[in-house]
Amino acid sequence: MSQIDETHAPDLKSWVEDANGHPDFPIQNLPLGIFSPPGEGPRAGVAVGDHILDLKAIGDSLPAAIRPALVDEHLNSLLGLPAATRRALRRRVSTLLSDEGARAAVAPALYKVAHCTLHLPARIGDYTDFYVGIHHATNVGTLFRPDNPLLPNYKYVPIGYHGRASSIRPSAVPVVRPRGQAKGPADSEPRFGPSQRLDYELELGIWIGEGNVLGDAIPIGAATDHIAGFCLLNDWSARDFQAWEYVPLGPFLAKNFHSTISPWVVTAEALAPFHIAQPPRTEGDPAPLPYLWDAQDQASGAYALDLRVYISTERMREAGRPPFRLSEGTAANMYWTAAQIVTHHASNGCNLNPGDLLGTGTISGPDRSALGSLLEITRGGAEPVDLPSGERRTFLEDGDEIILEARAHRDGFASIGFGECRARILPVRG
């Protein structure tokens, strides 16, 4: 597990003025990403305030073990480096951005974020989405199985499904309303057409760092060594397609048409101060099986993250209204830890690779103010949401934009954020 060091000092300041007090990217964060400066190709960078530091441009000032990874136009090689090497990179960049004496040499490698294009951080070879938000699982289960909302395996095994990596896009890329099959309770046969129940899902993404050899497991005590960082993830869902197709093999076309992620990898090292205890299980719940149990993980395997969801409709934007907050909750509402997710994924010998992405599944809280999807907020569409513009929503309409935010906080440390994860719904094509 990452350690707290001088890079987390709350009084640390940067000579990059807009980094000091920045809500997402103060010098205590330093997330990794891939960006293109104006007229140039993609390269690795670090976000600091409203700027991006070009790592390749300052390669000679960085640890030698880092430099070969900066040739790549993706972060896979860098994410796959040992945690100690990534920590050395973080410490060096922190020094360069806080030492006034380094300003003259480093400042030419800084670009304004507003002038750059942000890309997917990595070549995502594989994407798996889990279902570890217990309140979400209970709420959705109640809609479909009122007498038995959680299936017997839920509290024994971190449930997941293999998603579609090719349709993952960075923040701000629009979502085209999907077409598919759906069959309502009163329909005699299914129809094919645009989704009428398009929804979002508030999730965290877990970026895999060092992988494992095919056939080898990842012990629970070592799982955090394989986590390079986190992002926000919106797993867009066509609920009408999902209800028709998910039996017997689970999610398919209802999920694979588009997923949106925030473009910055908030590193495991940056999140070191924000570990908290995993909430205790409800009395009577089974203990995790031994391969998923680690006392240290239970003591500090959760994260102090505030999660928020906002909606902005076309009418709201035309009227100059700010986005409306749909929900606010905490990442501590996960039934399984990130380490347990990683360990279970590799427990059968499945090989994880640097740049693989794991979704937590929708993270909802115990009350309506902290629900992570419209399916839950509107109780399957039965209770519409009233917006300040006078509009109502059961599910998303064309022109709607969903914005996810996350911030880590803890007394005695500078808060850090993930940046926005946003996308707007476009009409179906054709």
Image (cartoon, rainbow, N blue to C red):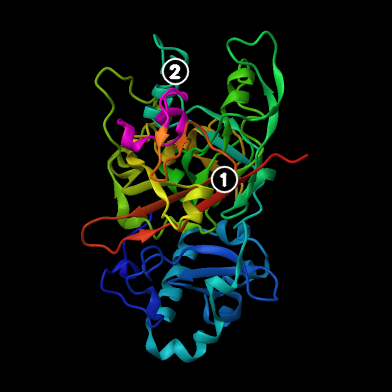
Indicate the position of residue 426 as horizontal and vertical percent values.
Answer: 64, 45
Q: Answer with left or right where residue 63 lies relative to residue 251.
A: left
Majority secondary structure in the magenta region: loop
Question: Secondary structure under badge 2?
Answer: helix
Callout 2 amino acid: Leu
Q: Residue at x 71, y 19 (%)?
A: 191
Question: Secondary structure under badge 1?
Answer: strand
Please give the residue where the numbered disc 2 appears in the rendered image: 143
Question: How far is mark 1 from mark 2, CA to CA?
Answer: 29 Å
Magenta span covers which residues? 366-384
Neighbor class of circle 2 (other Cα within 10 Å; few <14, some 14-19, many 20+) is some
Looking at the image, which residue sits at the far right?
A: 430
Please give the residue where the numbered disc 1 appears in the rendered image: 357
Q: Find residue 226 and name its label.
A: none
Indicate the position of residue 174 as horizontal and vertical percent values.
Answer: 62, 50
Q: Say if residue 344 shows up in the picture.
A: yes
Neighbor class of circle 1 (other Cα within 10 Å; few <14, some 14-19, many 20+) is many
Q: Mark 1 or 2 closer to N-term?
A: 2
